[in-house]
Image (cartoon, rainbow, N blue to C red):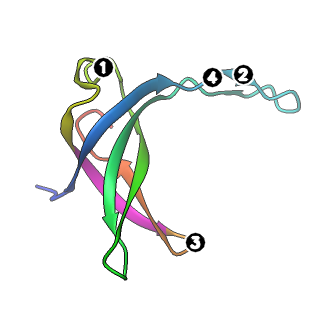
Amino acid sequence: MDTNWLLLNGTLSNVLETPTGTNRETGERYGGQHQVQVDVWKTLRNGQQRKDTETLTVPDYRPWEPHIGEQVQVPVGVSVWNGQLRFFYAGANR
């Protein structure tokens, strides 16, 4: 079954791995997610534009790293949380 995703267009501004740690109460490990940050321009209701940074968790940031500073297209899905659009990575190996 084919799924149609959206493409988020913007400038790749950063790649990172989130810090890891252990929850003191539960012993559960957290962090270590690979993320990319994409700068995008959003048009406001009054017609002006605002630059936002979308942070997306990806399986591996290393393939993205050589493209920092370049225009990229990232396959994303979208959901609404607290009245705000939230994007999530929808590429291969999600």
> For the residue marked with disc 3, what is the amino acid?
Asn
As measured in the structure, the alpha-carbon distance from the residue carrying label 3 to the one carrying label 2 is 28 Å
Instruction: Identify the amino acid type marked 2.
Output: Gly
Category of crowding for the residue at label 3, using alpha-carbon neighbours closer than 10 angstroms: few (below 14), some (14–19), many (at least 20): few
- Above or below residue 46? Residue 35 is above
Residue at image mark 3: 82
Say whether disc 3 or disc 2 marks the residue closer to the N-terminus: 2
Q: Are marks 1 and 3 in contact (CB under 8 Å)?
A: no
Q: Which residue is mark 2?
A: 21
| Main secondary structure type of the part rendered in magenta | strand
How far apart are labels 2 and 1 at the CA level?
24 Å
Q: How dense is the environment of label 2, judged by Cα within 10 Å: few (below 14), some, or many (20 and up)? A: few
Q: Which mark is residue 65?
A: 1
Label 1 and label 3: CA atoms lie apart by 31 Å
> In x, y percent, where is residue 47?
31, 78
The answer to the question of whether label 2 and label 4 lie on touching residues, with beta carbons closer than 8 A, is yes
Q: Position of residue 92 (x, y in %)?
A: 23, 36
Q: Nearer the viewer, mark 4 or mark 1?
A: 1
Q: Earlier in the sequence, mark 3 or mark 4?
A: 4
Residue span colored magenta: 74-80
